[in-house]
Amino acid sequence: MKFVVGGLVIVAALGYLGFVGMQESKAYYITVDEFHTMKGQLQGKTCKVAGDVVEGSIDRTRKPLEFTISHQGKSLKVQYVGKDVLPDTFKDGSKAVVEGTIAQDGRFEARHIEAKCASKYEAEYQKKGT
Amino acid sequence: MSEFGNFCLLLAFCLALYGLFASLIGAAARQHRIVRSAERAALGAGVSIALAVGSLIYLLLTSDFSVAHVASTTNRDLPAYYKIAALWGGHDGSMVLWCFVTALFSCIAIYQNRYRYRDMMPYVVAVLMANLAFFLCLNLFFANPFNQLVQVNADGTMEKFLPRDGRGLNPSLQYWAMVIHPPILYHGFIGFVVPFAFAIAALVTRQLGDAWIRTIRRWTLVPWLLLGVGLILGGKWAYVELGWGGYWGWDPVENSSLMPWLTATAFLHSVIVQERKGMLKVWNVLLITITFLLGIFGTFITRSGIVGSVHAFAESSLGPFLVGYMSVMLCISLYLILDRLPYLKSEHKLDSVVSRESAFLFNNLVLLIACFSIFWGVMFPVFSEWVRGTKMTVGPPFFNNVNIPIGLFLLFLTGVGPLFAWRKTSLESLKKAFVWPVAFSLVAAVALVAAGMRSFYAVMSFTLCVFVVATIVQEFYKGASVRSRNTGEGMGAALVNLTLRNKRRYGGYIVHFGVVVIFVGLTGNAFNQEAMQTLQRGQSLELGRYSLKLMDYAEGDDPNYAWARLTLEAYQDGKLLKVMRPEKRAYKFGDQQTTTEVELHSTPREDLYVIYVGPANDGSGHEVKVFVNPLVFWVWAGTIVLILGTFVTLLPDRKGAFATQQATLGEAPVLDEPAQIK
């Protein structure tokens, strides 16, 4: 009996911590075209947007660095404001996932970027039932 | 050669199928000879897969680029050892390795038990062969590494295609830890098939006593160790090769190899309760089933591309098959468990919360919560899409929030568990057992706070580490002094003999010590520092005790890549420490990937980790990023202790000692020690 009570206390405490952690780090995971259709409800929320880095769009002369990602004909201009060094795999044509929020002026401010080389990972992004 | 390899795979598949059906028929008809033939077929399948692996290695070494796998993972200039490693450098080849490891484990288990457990073995063979046949089938028909490159002509006809050179092995995989990491991890993932097969066989034959549990003890320890080492090697690789300054990022692929390790750890502890007290029988069968399935789930996550990961090296069509396989295996085991429930009755009840049993139960509970939280985090994108139609992800804060307290609680249990008595612990014995460990850890806590440490978790973690080490030292000291009094041996000899007489218990303490050392290393994360700056020749970057002065910049060419390198003088407290040369490489073949070559100065106190980011955009100099990561050294050091401790528990028993071990099941409380020696 005591064990059950102790167990429940532990489960409850960890459940609470987990819930807090989830609220803190929850992010929408969408592709660029979905981003445009859902734009209205994404204001102020963290999202991860997936798309291909458009050839020649990476502008390293600007600070912060700017580039464009696209998916299924739609594109999104991204400003990288994060502190981490960009991964080696981030370059023209690579598949990138940018994590951040929509800025005041409507551009996307990314704080974190993941990238994969396109040719090595030929699979398409997960098809959605839309 | 590729036809030969293909033939070997097909032969192995047929033999595995034969083994599956022959063992079942043999068991049903009680025909020993048919079962024997099934066992021989299993060994034959093993040899056949070995030949397939051999022929693929031959193709890789001779650079036969007509084979798709060879062309996509190697190039002519690749060193021979990387050509061999390219066997698992791509999806198809790694499936062959997976089958090979599966067959290897199956064959050893079957051979080892060729004279034992005659009534259980047909079912063990059947499960092992079903598993092998399944993966061989995937290998043959959906991920065949012997497939040839073909070219489709304009008129729709196809012809063979032979490229002049291959695309080369992904440069970030060209590192020693990455060469051995996948095979080790595979052994860990797939090794649990043997204990799983024994569990199923025990359920089918209704022999649910201790026999199967004891047989599979080593069979659980070995994959547990390999999985653990595989995880750490993966971390080491990420740390040294990926250049983001850390070794663990709660990435789905990392997580999915951690999950079976957590449940296996729970299993290793809860079997002790079953052996001693005859409790938790259902729980143990469930745990080993879950562990095995999570191993398959790990493969599923890596290969199906269902959740995005930096490590997912392949996205393939195997996903649905793996899901189907997991569901079938889960249904079979659940059905058997429910059907055999009366045979799985507990022989004892839990008496007190302050007892060894309850410490084990709490250990199991939180390990399972940890596993569940990770599962939840990994699958959250999938679940949220089912429920709300949009994919959502959770990040490191979620995993850390749940798992840091769990880690600390486990550390606490590691300290108190072994000191609790079975059934019930009296207040008197509690006082005696805990006086010194508590005193030491209080002193440590006060000292840490006085020294200015303010991070709650870090203080807790170090305090608990001191506590656990004190309990372990006390256990060894107590045992050894009793032994030396009784036998007249010196303390040193007594310590060694004590450990060898009771390998499982004292080896276990050594493993615990290794875990503590790893925790010390992990806790260092709370104090990581980083800085990034653009430097011109002669300028310096300051971080903590260190100062880095840019001396030189050079560019050059290598057959495989072009490089750009900085020369930095690293000063520690004003004194020259060493010259560091972080590098950026642009590989010439395949995807023309660029890589970051990290410069690392590692000491027990902290790592100085330097990377060259690249030339500044405005041409004003070179960007350098520096991390100071305290105590990382201890993560690797603790792993070595953990490996040694596991080896001690795996040492074979001497004939004489075996009887004693069987009698006490290796878990006698300290006070029984003299009785054992007499």
Image (cartoon, rainbow, N blue to C red):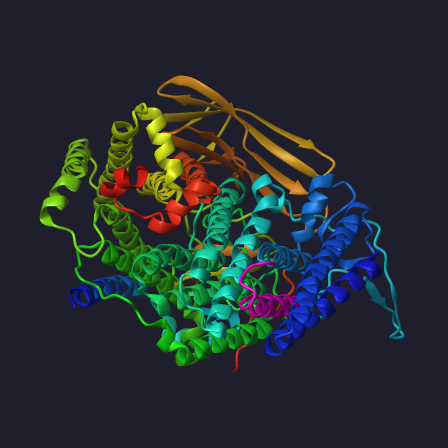
What segment carries the magenta color? Answer: B114-136
B169 horizontally vs B306: left or right: right
In magenta segment, residue B415: no
Residue B195 placed where, x, y %? 49, 61
Q: Position of residue B376 (x, y in %)?
A: 38, 67
Image position, residue A120 (x, y; %):
65, 57
Q: Residue at x 48, y 57 (%)?
A: B215
The quarter of the image holding the N terminus of chain B is: bottom right
Predominant SS along the magenta part:
helix
The residue sitting at 50% across, 58% down in the picture is: B253
Picture layout, residue B211 above or below residue B185 = below
Q: Residue furthest bottom?
A: A130
- Residue B351 occupies quadrant: bottom left
Total label count?
A: 0
Q: Is B403 placed above or below A50 here? A: above
In the foreground, B230 or B652: B652
State left or right for residue B455 relative to residue B192: left
